[in-house]
């Protein structure tokens, strides 16, 4: 190796070291600009931040750094918007599914309670019929002048208990029907009042004749 070669090598090595040092300085300068940008974004408008960085002569990379970070920020913003749109769509889908499920559940409940209302009406009709039969029986007993010794007391007591059981069932069904919105409180009160009146009249007549 000749002396000239060594000098050329040393010169190239020095130049390389200078470039590496310059590269590190530029990297540090870029990171500083990035840090300032992030910090300033939370309190200053974008235009003011860019003006501040460009006007600073010690930061030659400020315009390009701001542009790069600006582009990155806009890209992240677009990605976030897509995610938000997807979340809103999923939320909308979920609410729609819940609404459909609720409608199906409500339809099923209405169907179930509709059957209960029909059953309640049947119970009311049967109760009224039983009361009419009880009144007719007690009238016949009174007109016949029968005493307790000749009355079918067991049958009369069983009929009295049957009236109470049917009334209890009717009341429960009416409560459920009102809760489901099929009848109003006035409807329920009217039906139960008629049932109570008929039931008590029949039960009292049975008790009076049987004693």
Image (cartoon, grey):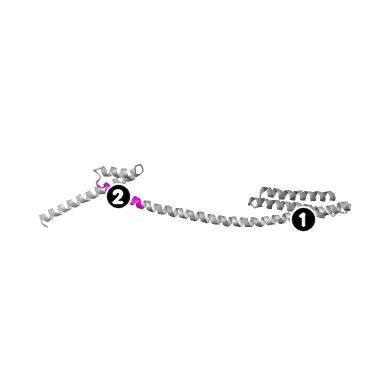
Q: Please tell me in which quadrant of the rendered image residue 113 appears.
A: bottom right
Can you say whether 42 is above or below 173 in the image? above
Closer to the camera in the image, 210 or 112: 112
Q: Is residue 158 visible?
A: no
Magenta stretch encompasses residue 74: yes
Q: Which mark is residue 129?
A: 1
Q: Residue at x 83, y 48 (%)?
A: 208
Question: Could you tell me which secondary element the residue under label 1 belongs to?
Answer: helix
How far apart are labels 1 and 2 at the CA level? 91 Å
Q: What secondary structure predominates along the stretch shown in magenta?
A: helix
At label 2, counting other C-alpha atoms closer than 10 Å, the crowd grade (few under 14, some 14-19, many 20 or more) is few
**Quadrant location of the N terminus in the rendered image:** bottom left
Where does the magenta region start and end? 60-75
- How many labels, in total? 2
Closer to the camera in the image, 196 or 72: 196
At label 1, counting other C-alpha atoms closer than 10 Å, the crowd grade (few under 14, some 14-19, many 20 or more) is few
Magenta stretch encompasses residue 82: no
Along the horizontal axis of the image, is 60 left or right of 92? left
Along the horizontal axis of the image, is 20 left or right of 185? left
Q: Residue at x 59, y 55 (%)?
A: 106
Q: Is residue 76 visible?
A: yes
Residue 69, position in %: x, y? 31, 49
Q: Residue at x 15, y 54 (%)?
A: 9
Closer to the camera in the image, 71 or 168: 71
Q: Please tell me in which quadrant of the rendered image residue 3 appears.
A: bottom left
Query: Circle 2 sits on which residue?
Result: 67
Question: Could you tell me which secondary element the residue under label 2 belongs to?
Answer: helix
Residue 79, position in %: x, y? 38, 53
- Precedes in sequence: disc 1 or disc 2: 2
């Amino acid at each position: 190796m000749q002396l000239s070669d060594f000098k050329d090598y040393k010169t190239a090595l020095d130049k390389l070291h200078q470039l590496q040092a310059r590269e590190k300085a530029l990297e540090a300068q870029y990171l500083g600009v990035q840090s300032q940008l992030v910090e300033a974004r939370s309190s200053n408008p974008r235009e003011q931040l860019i003006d501040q960085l460009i006007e600073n002569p010690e930061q030659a990379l400020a315009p390009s750094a701001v542009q790069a970070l600006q582009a990155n920020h806009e890209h992240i913003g677009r990605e976030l918007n897509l995610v938000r749109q997807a979340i809103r769509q999923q939320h909308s889908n979920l609410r729609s599914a819940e609404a459909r499920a609720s409608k199906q559940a409500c339809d099923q409940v209405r169907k179930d309670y509709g059957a209960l209302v029909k059953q309640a009406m049947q119970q009311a009709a049967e109760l009224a019929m039983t009361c009419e039969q009880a009144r007719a029986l007690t009238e016949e007993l009174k007109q016949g002048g029968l005493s307790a010794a000749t009355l079918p007391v067991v049958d009369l007591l069983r009929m009295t208990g049957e009236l109470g059981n049917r009334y209890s069932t009717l009341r429960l069904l009416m409560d459920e029907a009102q809760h489901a919105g099929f009848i109003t409180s006035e409807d329920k009160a009217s039906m139960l009042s008629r049932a109570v009146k008929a039931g008590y009249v029949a039960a009292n007549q049975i008790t009076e004749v049987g004693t």
